[in-house]
Amino acid sequence: MAEPVYRRVVVKLSGEYFAGAQSYGIDQPTIDRIAGDLIAAKRLGIEIAVVVGGGNIFRGVEVSARGVSRTTGDTMGMLATVMNCLALAEALERHGQPARTLSALSMPEVCELFTQAAANRYLCEGRIVLLAGGTGNPFFTTDTTAVLRAAEIGADAVLKATNVDGVYSADPKKDASAKRFDRLTHSEALAGGYKVMDATAFALARETSLPIIVFSIAEPGSIGAVLGGAGRATIVAD
Ligand code: UDP
């Protein structure tokens, strides 16, 4: 078998996938499926860290529209990502894969604080490392967290899971004329204003020369397929 192209990656999973077919909360069968996909990808010999969103439980910007301050709303959003990580870590362990949750927010009774050294150590030990609590700061997203953490831990790429098989010029579920890209530069992704990741995340990826691989999580096994070079994806890289 060919050597995998990537040695260490950060996978970004939006909270919305954790809700499965529901619009809110945590759907256990879906988490089990995602855990299985991550384990299969790990067996390719790749070190995997995962940044999980929180949109299935809380998004700061949505509650701030209803009168809660943005910083409080964002803190609630960051706490939601911790809940998702705990659920995923347990599913991974149940399937026999050692995992470890590291949080940007200090909560020693729940999980360890994120440091680059701790993440590095657990990845080298063969664990899947779950990165909770976003960046630890309001006004950021977990997409930006994924790029930031990838740069910090020396990952080779960020795998951004979406509902479609790459970056399109418009939402292909709404616009039949939407064009799909196989490859884009970071600058093209920024200039195009494509909704797949926020501009801060793309700008940081450009600055740190990190490739972003956009793929669909809807297909079971897609994480391993993309990492093995067989899956369909858009590569955003300079
Ligand atoms: N969040 C934050 N700082 C961060 C990351 C996340 O304040 O560094 C908050 C923010 O309120 C965000 C929520 O956590 O809406 C959930 O993250 P995100 O929206 O990125 O989750 P996803 O859309 O991927 O589920």
Image: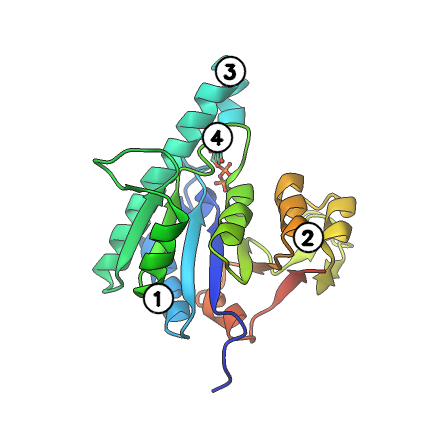
What kind of colouring is applied to the model shown?
A: rainbow
Kind of residue at disc 2: Pro
Real-space Cα separation, disc 2 to disc 4, in angstroms: 33 Å
Q: Which residue is mark 4?
A: 137
Q: Secondary structure at mark 2?
A: loop
Real-space Cα separation, disc 1 to disc 4, in angstroms: 30 Å
Labels 2 and 4: the sequence-earlier one: 4
Q: Could you tell me which quadrant the C terminus lies in?
A: bottom right
Nearer the observer: mark 2 or 4; the answer is 4
Which percent across, then down, holds residue 199? 67, 41
Kind of residue at disc 1: Ile
Label ID, residue 66? 3
Residues 165 and 101: in front is 101
Labels 1 and 3: the sequence-earlier one: 1
Labels 2 and 1: the sequence-earlier one: 1
Kind of residue at disc 3: Arg
Label ID, residue 39? 1
Which percent across, then down, holds residue 29? 32, 54
Kind of residue at disc 4: Asn
Dots 1 and 4: beta carbons under 8 Å? Answer: no
Q: Secondary structure at mark 3?
A: loop
Q: Which residue is mark 2?
A: 172
Residue at the image position 74 percent from the left and 43 percent from the top: 193
Labels 1 and 4: the sequence-earlier one: 1
Nearer the observer: mark 1 or 3; the answer is 1
Dot 1 crowding, Cα within 10 Å, few <14, some 14–19, many 20+: many
Real-space Cα separation, disc 4 to disc 3, in angstroms: 21 Å
Residue at the image position 68 percent from the left and 52 percent from the top: 172
Dot 3 crowding, Cα within 10 Å, few <14, some 14–19, many 20+: few
Nearer the observer: mark 1 or 4; the answer is 4
